[in-house]
Image (spheres, rainbow, N blue to C red):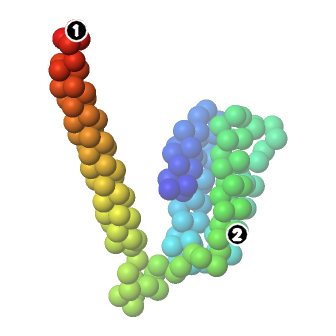
């Protein structure tokens, strides 16, 4: 997700920045490939290369600053979670699961069940309230002078 956002940021570079756009996109793709294959060290080097390309004091536009900030945050994220980044290329070669769709599906089912239960509880509360109101109206209609 973060790489996609940074790719869009790189595509948004304008003017003189267009000359470095192709190199930035290529380096982003390279870092993505390294991460896909579990090589955090090379991915961080690739991000360092991107920072060197973008960090030019003379041409530091707001878009470049924004992209640099995103790159630095991404590197911190990668280094913090390095031990949790799997080698998807190796998993794919051995026929192991590389998607987390089954986990998302389970979470969605649990959330859906809880939501349905909550709706049922609200319906029961409304039914009880209506029952009390109808009982109250019957009682009030029996009292002389109220209806």
Q: CA distance from mark 2 to mark 1?
A: 79 Å
Residue topped by disc 1 = 145
> Residue drawn 21% across and 31% down?
135
Give residue 8's position: percent from left, percent from top. 51, 45
In the current view of this chain or complex, which residue is farthest to the top?
145
Closest to the camera, between mark 2 and mark 1, is 1
In the current view of this chain or complex, which residue is farthest to the right?
57
In the displayed structure image, the side of residue 124 where residue 32 appears, left or right:
right
Give residue 113's position: percent from left, percent from top. 30, 59
Q: Quadrant of the C terminus?
A: top left
In the current view of this chain or complex, which residue is farthest to the bottom?
94
Res. 30 image quadrant: bottom right
In the displayed structure image, the side of residue 27 where residue 56 appears, left or right:
right
Rendered position, 88 above or below 119: below
Q: Is residue 119 visible?
A: no
Residue 122 or residue 18, whichever sits in front: 122
Count of numbered circles in the view: 2
Res. 57 image quadrant: top right
In terms of secondary structure, where does tag 1 sit? loop
> Residue drawn 61% across and 32% down?
15
Residue topped by disc 2 = 79
Rendered position, 143 above or below 106: above
In the displayed structure image, the side of residue 49 where residue 30 appears, left or right:
left
> Residue drawn 28% across and 53% down?
116
């Amino acid at each position: 997700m973060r790489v996609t956002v940074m790719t869009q940021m790189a595509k948004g570079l304008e003017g003189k920045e267009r000359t470095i756009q192709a190199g930035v996109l290529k380096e982003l793709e390279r870092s993505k490939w390294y991460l896909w294959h579990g090589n955090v060290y090379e991915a961080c080097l690739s991000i360092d290369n991107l920072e060197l390309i973008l960090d030019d004091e003379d041409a530091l536009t707001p878009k470049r600053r924004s992209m640099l900030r995103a790159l630095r945050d991404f590197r911190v994220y990668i280094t913090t979670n390095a031990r949790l980044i799997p080698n998807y290329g190796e998993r794919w070669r051995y026929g192991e699961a590389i998607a987390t769709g089954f986990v998302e599906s389970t979470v969605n089912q649990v959330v859906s069940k809880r939501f349905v239960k909550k709706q049922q509880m609200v319906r029961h509360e409304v039914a009880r309230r209506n029952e009390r109101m109808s009982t109250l109206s019957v009682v009030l209609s029996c009292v002389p002078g109220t209806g």
